[in-house]
Amino acid sequence: MVSKVSMAVDLGGVRMKNPVNTASGTFGFGWQFEGFYDVSRLGAITTKGTSAVPWEGNPAPRLCEVTSGIMNSVGLANPASAGFSPRVGSNFRQLEEAGLFA
């Protein structure tokens, strides 16, 4: 009989149930993917960055074709650090209850 294998890791003092993590900025703040993927299966979510003041992102045009590809200046929109906790905190508590954090 095979026993259950623990995939838990300790990353700088943060205990996660597994090492699977999202890349910074690619997963928004987590709730955007709840209908698409069971985010409680992840070990952690690395959120988008935040700024001191709310930021809507850079104005268009945000992309520019260059010889070797495309250069972007999206300037990621975010609710600011003061708006981050109230807006995202309750969602993180729900994810914690669902077992996202060890």
Image: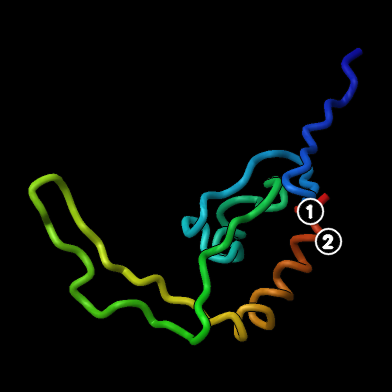
Please state which amino acid type lies under the numbered disc 1: Phe
Provide residue 58's location: percent of width, then percent of height: 30, 77
Q: From what the image shows, is residue 53 above or below residue 28?
A: below
The chosen color scheme is rainbow
Question: At 39% from the left edge and 82% from the top edge, which residue is drawn?
Answer: 56
User: Which of 96 and 10 lies nearest the eye of the viewer?
Assistant: 10
Secondary structure beneath dot 2 equals helix
**Left or right of residue 32: residue 59:** left
The residue under label 2 is 97
Measured in 3D between alpha carbons, the distance from the residue under mark 2 to the one under mark 1, in whole angstroms, is: 8 Å
Secondary structure beneath dot 1 equals loop
Please state which amino acid type lies under the numbered disc 2: Glu
> Farthest residue toward the front?
12
Provide residue 63's location: percent of width, then percent of height: 20, 64
Disc marking residue 42: none
Q: From what the image shows, is residue 87 above or below residue 45?
A: below
Question: At 49% from the left edge and 87% from the top edge, which residue is drawn?
Answer: 53
Q: In which quarter of the view is residue 83 placed?
A: bottom right
**Left or right of residue 48: residue 5:** right
> Farthest residue toward the top?
1
Image quadrant for the N terminus? top right
Question: At 80% from the left edge and 37% from the top edge, which residue is drawn?
Answer: 8
Provide residue 34's location: percent of width, then percent of height: 61, 59
Question: At 57% from the left edge and 62% from the top edge, which residue is drawn?
Answer: 47
The residue under label 1 is 101
